[in-house]
Amino acid sequence: MSVRIRLKRFGTKRRPYFRIVVMDSRKPRDGRTIEEVGFYHPIEIEDKQIKIKEDRIRHWLDRGAQPSETVRKLLNNLNFHIK
């Protein structure tokens, strides 16, 4: 099973927000998740845009989960370095 850390979309048209989730890469974008590890609100103010559970993300990365490109960029913006 290939596990990915990626975004799951919620919200309405023009008012999106995303949850950062761990899920099987073969599942659809809004399908069943293994675990929710954070959220991303792109239209909020800078301080409230992103919140993550660093320990849980580190746990999944240590077990071989691969972040999507978007999640990788978000984590790098937070100075959360991925090996």
Image: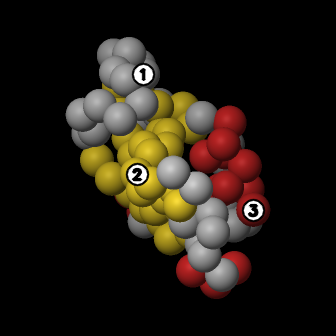
Residue at x-position 38% and y-position 16%: 26
**In the rendered structure, are the residues bearing label 1 and label 3 in contact, judged by CB atoms less than 8 Å apart?**
no
Q: Nearer the viewer, residue 75 or 82?
A: 75
Residue at x-position 35% and y-position 35%: 30
Q: Is residue 57 visible?
A: no
Query: Which badge, 1 or 3, comes first in the chain's sequence?
Result: 1
Residue type, label 1: Ser
- In this figure, which residue is indicated by the disc labeled 1? 25
Q: State left or right for residue 76 relative to residue 67.
A: right
Name the element at disc 2: strand
User: Distance between the Cα atoms at labels 1 and 3?
Assistant: 24 Å
Q: Nearer the viewer, mark 2 or mark 1?
A: 2
Q: Which labelled disc corresponds to residue 10?
A: 2
Q: Is residue 42 visible?
A: yes
Q: State left or right for residue 81 relative to residue 60.
A: right
Rendered view: 42 above or below 65:
below
- In this figure, which residue is indicated by the disc labeled 3? 77
Image mark count:
3
Say few, some or many: other residues with alpha carbon within 10 Å of mark 1 (under 14 / 14 to 19 / 20 or more): some
Q: Nearer the viewer, residue 10 or 55?
A: 10
Residue at x-position 43% and y-position 43%: 8
Name the element at disc 1: loop
Residue type, label 3: Asn
- Where's the C terminus, which quadrant? top right
Residue type, label 2: Phe
User: Distance between the Cα atoms at labels 2 and 3?
Assistant: 22 Å
